[in-house]
């Protein structure tokens, strides 16, 4: 993703919206309210890239873990449990 852009207040956004939007088309722009970051404006390509990345993540459970990986995990837990605390 492109570097983070400028930072503008909400009052800047109302006064200079065209300039801020033009900048947001090049790189993300932070909008602050009472000196705290509240919003980020970014172009649609960056937004869609973020959405694709978040969609690629998934949550698994021990029940859905492949058996080979589950066996490795259980062996590692057993090995760790078998060591005394001074070796940890």
Image (cartoon, helix red, strand yellow):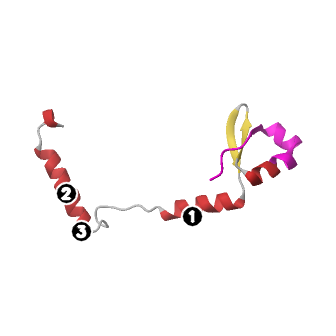
Labels 2 and 1 touching (C-beta < 8 A) = no
Helix, strand or loop under label 1: helix
Residue 16 belongs to the span the image colors magenta: yes
Helix, strand or loop under label 3: helix
For the C terminus, the image quarter is top left
Magenta stretch: give its range.
1-20
Helix, strand or loop under label 2: helix
- Location of mark 2 (residue): 74
78 with respect to 2 (left or right): left
- Does label 3 or label 2 sit earlier along the sequence? 3
- Location of mark 3 (residue): 67
Q: Quadrant of residue 13?
A: top right
Task: Return the residue nearer the eye: 33 or 30.
Answer: 30
- Residue 21 in the image: state x and y as whole percent: 81, 51
- Residue 27 in the image: state x and y as whole percent: 71, 50
- Does label 3 or label 1 sit earlier along the sequence? 1
Circle number at residue 10: none
- Location of mark 1 (residue): 52
Callout 2 crowding tier (Cα within 10 Å): few <14, some 14–19, many ≥20: few
| Cα gap from disc 3 to disc 2, whole angstroms | 10 Å
| Cα gap from disc 3 to disc 1, whole angstroms | 28 Å
Residue 8 in the image: above or below residue 47: above
| Cα gap from disc 2 to disc 1, whole angstroms | 32 Å
């Amino acid at each position: 993703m492109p570097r983070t852009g400028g930072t503008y207040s909400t009052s800047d956004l109302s006064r200079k919206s065209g300039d801020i939007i033009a900048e947001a088309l090049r790189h993300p722009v932070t909008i602050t309210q009472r000196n705290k970051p509240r919003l980020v404006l970014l172009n649609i390509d960056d937004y869609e890239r973020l959405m694709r990345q978040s969609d690629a993540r998934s949550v698994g459970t021990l029940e859905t873990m492949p058996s080979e990986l589950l066996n490795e995990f259980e062996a590692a837990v057993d090995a760790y449990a078998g060591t005394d605390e001074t070796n940890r």
